[in-house]
Image (cartoon, rainbow, N blue to C red):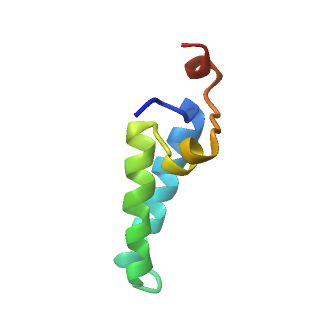
Amino acid sequence: MKTNIHPIERGVRIVLGIVILSLIFVGPKSWWGLIGIVLIFIGLTGWCPPYQLLGLSTCKKCQDA
């Protein structure tokens, strides 16, 4: 699992994941909020499986390593 997400994108995914996860408790109270857990996991690890399958990376520093 090689990091393929830029640090700013990681932060955005974590924040977005927390917001989506909050849908379980507030708002429409939908179980779709569990998708937020996936975004938080991807943000914390810095590895996005679809990016790897498509050969993409937003982390230029990581590509050089």
x and y percent of residue 6 in the render? Answer: 58, 32
In the displayed structure, would residue 43 be above or below residue 2? below
Residue placed most toward the observer, 26 or 60: 60
x and y percent of residue 16 in the render? Answer: 52, 56
Direction from residue 22 to residue 60 in the image, left or right = right
User: Residue at position x 40%, y 58% from top?
Assistant: 38
- The quarter of the rendered structure image containing the C terminus is top right
The answer to whether any part of residue 26 appears in the image is no
x and y percent of residue 59 in the render? Answer: 61, 28
In the displayed structure, would residue 22 be above or below residue 53? below
Residue most extreme to the top: 65
Direction from residue 27 to residue 9 in the image, left or right = right
User: Residue at position x 38%, y 40% from top?
Assistant: 44
x and y percent of residue 41 in the render? Answer: 37, 49
Direction from residue 48 to residue 61 in the image, left or right = right
The answer to whether any part of residue 19 appears in the image is yes
Residue placed most toward the observer, 7 or 5: 5
Direction from residue 37 to residue 5 in the image, left or right = right
User: Residue at position x 47%, y 67% from top?
Assistant: 20
User: Residue at position x 54%, y 31% from top?
Assistant: 7
